[in-house]
Image (cartoon, grey):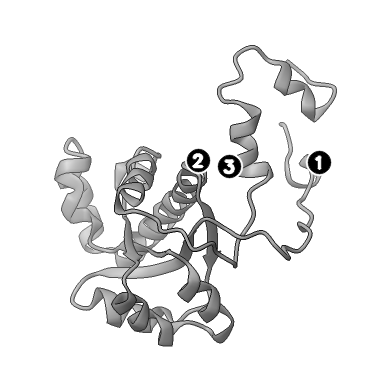
Amino acid sequence: MVYSKVEDWRAEPDHAISDAALDAIFREARTLRKWRDKPVTPALLMAIYDLTRWGPTESNICPARFHFIVSPEAKARLQPLLDEGNIAQTMAAPATAIVAYDLDFAATLPVLAPRSAEKMQARLAGDPAKVELMATRSAGLQGGYFMVAARALGLDCGPMSGFDRAGVDREFFAGTQIKSYFLCNLGYGDREGLRPRQARLGFDDACKIL
């Protein structure tokens, strides 16, 4: 099937989810920096992860780890590690996810990939660069799934990279092989004063059908 216009695909009878859902997840979703005073419950955080975990990763290694900063005590630990411009929005957010990756993901392979676990563990044991590449590549995918899941469940997201990664690793992941990747504020956003959305590349600028 070749469509004459990008919008024509919406007429397909096997359209998997509604346009309203696609708007919430993609077209109308924005990076939020202001938050309404409405909590994000532990049950909702668990529901986000329950959806996230089904997304595919390389050899099913599932290296992403998610630590949710919710309590005043945890926020106080995170605050000095944030760039100045990210402090106010993060302290106001009902929850902040530290999206991280575990360099010791091979330890879980007997559960996640039992048929290839032993061979993969032996191969990775002497190749830390390969471990890092696999962990960051698949955790990046899982971080994307995480934001899609959060939006699908009615939350807004505020992903950001402006923080002291080494400091976060020392404060929250000491004694482990877990490394922080990015932060994502979660909550019910306040869109007042939101700037106009910036442009995105069109299909012809970013894609080729070969």
Q: Earlier in the sequence, mark 1 or mark 3?
A: 3
In front: label 2 or label 1:
2
Residue on which the image places disc 1: 204
**In percent of the image, x 77 and y 19: which residue is there?**
2
Closer to the camera, 85 or 7? 85
Q: Are marks 3 and 2 in contact (CB under 8 Å)?
A: yes
What is the secondary structure assignment of the residue under circle 3?
helix
Quadrant of image for the N terminus? top right
Residue picked out by circle 3: 25
Q: Which mark is residue 152?
A: 2
Query: Which amino acid type corresponds to the residue marked 2 in the rendered image?
Result: Ala
Image-based side of 5 in relation to 39, left or right: right
Is residue 173 rendered to the left or right of residue 94? Answer: left
Task: Please name the residue shown 23% across and 48% down the image.
Answer: 120
Q: Residues within 10 Å of mark 1 (few under 14, many from 20)?
A: few
Total of numbered circles in the picture?
3
Q: Is residue 89 above or below residue 185?
A: below
Q: Nearer the viewer, mark 1 or mark 3?
A: 3
Number of residues whose C-alpha sits closer than 10 Å to that of mark 2, classed few (under 14), some (14–19) or many (20 or more): some
Tell me how far mark 2 sits from mark 1, CA to CA.
28 Å
Relative image position of residue 170 (x, y in whole percent):
29, 82
Sooner in the amino-acid sequence: mark 2 or mark 1? 2
